[in-house]
């Protein structure tokens, strides 16, 4: 509930709730890196005040300032990008490793809650594994709150996500956020639906999966994001990972040296792809999900060895969107076969 008796010092932030609630019992924060914030706001409970973090000022400071105006809340909820053992708050990743730095502010968050209040963290994989559990338990100890986080994809069920918070410290007393209309998950998704591909010695590079898809409805572009492709098993020094250049026409992927283009416009650069060295693409603000999808559709494998080593190569791929989201790792098998050289 709003604490009208607390007089706060002047603040550099001008944060107002995007919903008008006379007597809120919960507060929901949505990080600036999350798209479709309006849909999330619309699914919040009627007694929840919703704040959109501004993406410019330190997010932890913004949350601390807002919560200083509340007391006796049933819950504080945060929706943002996540990864194992970490949740993104603006330009900061909150982990158990930096609790010391933010400890005093985190303790004040707990003062906004009642004795059984909950701190709910909606972000992909935040509570996964021992590292995730350490984050949840550590936050519970610092804030005095019951804390819950997700250990898998958070978001739309059709994309493999859900709004369940499976990892908990303490008893969670309020229903969680359910946003069926939210059309994405809080991390990018790379899908390689095709079967294993075959590469024969001396052949042209083989395209890994022309049916590949890339989606990220919470990020309009992948500025500063990366796509990393590695040979994770069965690799040899002759392995080559590369990109099939289509041209500079609309909808095509092209290359100009190390510069990657889409429709003739640079979308990033690449390095590596030789032997055991990962192939890494680094994107700029022109790299939309649609552009990166075409790129992934044209990734190739080849082998330059004179006497090729037959066997399977396991390739792994992971995408970061530049806003803190990281896809789950996907795999593709390449069946490599040698040929008998004439005597």
Image: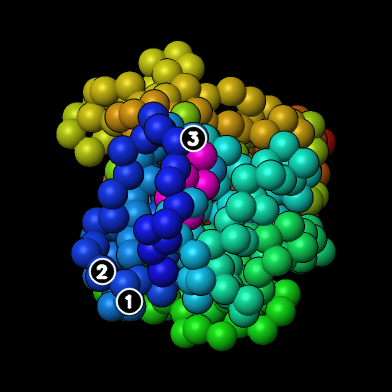
Q: Residue tagged by mark 3? A: 58
Q: Earlier in the sequence, mark 3 or mark 1?
A: 1
Q: Residue at x 76, y 50 (%)?
A: 96
Q: Is residue 30 above or below residue 241?
A: below
Left or right of 286: which side holds 177? right
Task: In the displayed orientation, state which residue is furthest to the front.
Answer: 5
Q: Residue at x 28, y 78 (%)?
A: 46
Q: Position of residue 150 (x, y in %)?
A: 60, 70
Q: Which residues are magenta?
A: 61-67
Q: Is 238 included in the stretch rendered in magenta? A: no
Q: Residue tagged by mark 2? A: 21
| C-alpha separation, residue under disc 2 versus residue under disc 3 | 25 Å
Q: Residue at x 56, y 85 (%)?
A: 173
| C-alpha separation, residue under disc 3 versus residue under disc 1 | 26 Å
Please count the marks in the image.
3
Q: Residue tagged by mark 1? A: 47
In what element is the residue under mark 3?
Answer: loop
| Neighbour tally class for label 3: few under 14, some 14-19, many 20 plus, Cα within 10 Å | some
Location of the N terminus by quadrant is bottom left
């Amino acid at each position: 509930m709003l604490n009208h008796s607390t007089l706060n010092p002047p603040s550099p932030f001008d944060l107002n709730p995007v919903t008008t609630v006379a007597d809120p019992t919960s507060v929901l924060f949505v990080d600036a890196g999350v798209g479709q914030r309006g849909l999330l706001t619309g699914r919040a409970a009627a007694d929840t005040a919703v704040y959109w973090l501004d993406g410019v000022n330190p997010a932890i400071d913004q949350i601390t300032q807002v919560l200083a105006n509340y007391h006796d809340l049933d819950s504080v909820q945060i929706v943002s990008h996540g990864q194992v053992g970490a949740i993104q708050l603006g330009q900061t990743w909150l982990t158990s490793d930096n609790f010391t730095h933010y400890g005093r502010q985190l303790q004040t968050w707990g003062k906004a809650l009642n004795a059984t209040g909950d701190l709910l963290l909606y972000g992909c994989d935040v509570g996964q594994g021992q590292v995730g559990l350490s984050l949840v338990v550590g936050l519970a100890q610092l804030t005095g709150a019951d804390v819950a986080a997700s250990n898998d994809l958070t978001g739309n069920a059709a994309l493999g996500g859900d709004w369940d918070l499976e990892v908990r410290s303490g008893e969670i007393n309020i229903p969680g956020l359910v946003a069926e209309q939210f059309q994405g998950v809080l991390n990018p998704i790379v899908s390689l639906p095709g079967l294993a591909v075959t590469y024969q010695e001396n052949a042209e590079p083989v395209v890994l999966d022309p049916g590949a898809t890339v989606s990220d409805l919470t990020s309009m572009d992948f500025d500063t994001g990366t796509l990393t492709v590695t040979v994770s098993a069965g690799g040899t020094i002759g392995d080559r990972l590369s990109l099939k250049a289509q041209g500079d026409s609309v909808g095509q992927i092209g290359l100009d040296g190390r510069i990657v283009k889409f429709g003739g416009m640079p979308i990033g650069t690449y390095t590596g792809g030789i032997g055991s060295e990962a192939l890494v693409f680094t994107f700029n603000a022109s790299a939309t999900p649609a552009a990166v999808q075409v790129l992934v559709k044209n990734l190739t494998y080849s082998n330059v060895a004179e006497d090729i080593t037959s066997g399977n190569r396991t390739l792994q791929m992971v995408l970061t969107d530049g806003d803190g989201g990281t896809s789950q790792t996907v795999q593709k098998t390449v069946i490599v076969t040698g040929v008998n050289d004439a005597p």
